Amino acid sequence: MTTMLKSISVEVPICIIGQSIAQYNYPVLCYLSEDNKLSLSFHQGIGRIKIWWSIPITAYLENKLSNILSPHLRGLGLDLHVEGKVLPPIDSLIAILHVVLREVGRERALSPSHLRKLAISEERARIVLEAMRVKGLIAYRRGEGLMELRRDFPWRACLCIKTFYRFRLAEFKSFEESFNVVLHALGRLIVVAARSIIDGDFELFRETLTRYSRLSLAVSNLPLTVLQVYEKLSRIEGVACKIDEDFRGFMLFSEKEVSLNKCLSMASRMGFQVLSLRG
């Protein structure tokens, strides 16, 4: 029988839009709520890490965490439980590593070598660590820090994942000027998205996410089939659909549960694992 030594509750932010272009110094919108928590339990053990999480890539996350954390646990085991809503995997991974490395006494938490093992940029990690400090909807931009926009996020949200292959914007060196124009447009759309959330204007939010997603898909490394799926999901009335900027999947938002359930049912029939983030 194992003896629990310490239990910690960790609030994990949800990166809503902008993760993929943060490295180009564009803003990111994040939301942190008391409802979005992970419970970390340290006990006597030999560095084993177990995640109690009903998502399709749990084994993938366990493997990633074990590769980095096991050498640092020094006779400890670690269990992770999701409290309440399901959380985005990459945001959770960054938050978990930061908290555990801090708890086991390392002077510096997430190092560049840790992030390389996770295939996560330093700017992507910095977004989550900054967002963990403030509850509500915030905008973050490198060099400018955090800007609090509103205390809540007004709509329901879900995540659809089919595989754990990453979404990446593909830089076209032969068309650098055109690529920069697209990046600028994506950055401007994030500003519009922020304004729509502040005003509670769901139709503007929906239109903005559609434009953002189509531009992102046009310069991504994803196959045409992903665009075809996106077009089907985004046509459902009352649902705002956005390409997920970490994995091959989509984020869905809605004012009404019935509209969201219709979209989720369609996504499930197409082989996507559906994860409820909030609402």
Image (spheres, helix red, strand yellow):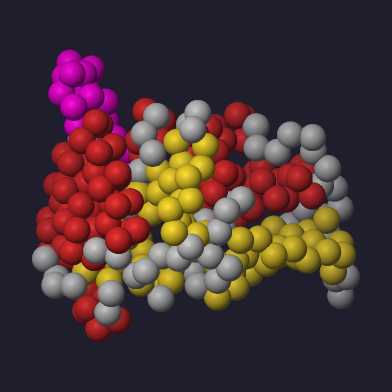
* Foreground residue among 231 and 256: 256
State which region is magenta.
Answer: 163-182
In the shown orientation, is residue 238 left or right of residue 264?
left
Count of marks placed on residues: 0
In the shown orientation, is residue 3 left or right of residue 22? Answer: right
Residue at the extreme front of the image, as rendered: 199
In percent of width and height, residue 81 lies at 63, 69
x then y, percent, for residue 83? 60, 73
In the displayed structure image, the side of residue 165 where residue 205 appears, left or right: left
Q: Residue at x 54, y 49 (%)?
A: 131
Q: Is residue 154 left or right of residue 75?
A: left
Residue beneath the point at 22% across and 78% down: 259
Snapshot quadrant of residue 40: bottom right
Residue 153 percent coordinates (x, y): 41, 65
The answer to whether residue 103 is visible is yes
At 16% from the left and 48% from the top, the residue drawn is 211
Against 37, is 216 above or below?
above
Taking depth in this image into account, of 90 and 153 the one nearest to the observer is: 153
Which quadrant: the N terminus?
bottom right
Q: Is residue 120 visible?
A: no
Image location (x, y in percent) of residue 212:
22, 46
Residue 151 among those drawn in magenta: no
Q: Toward the viewer: 198 or 114?
A: 198
Q: Quadrant of residue 21?
A: top left
1 up-or-down from 253: above or below: below
Q: Residue at x 37, y 69 (%)?
A: 154
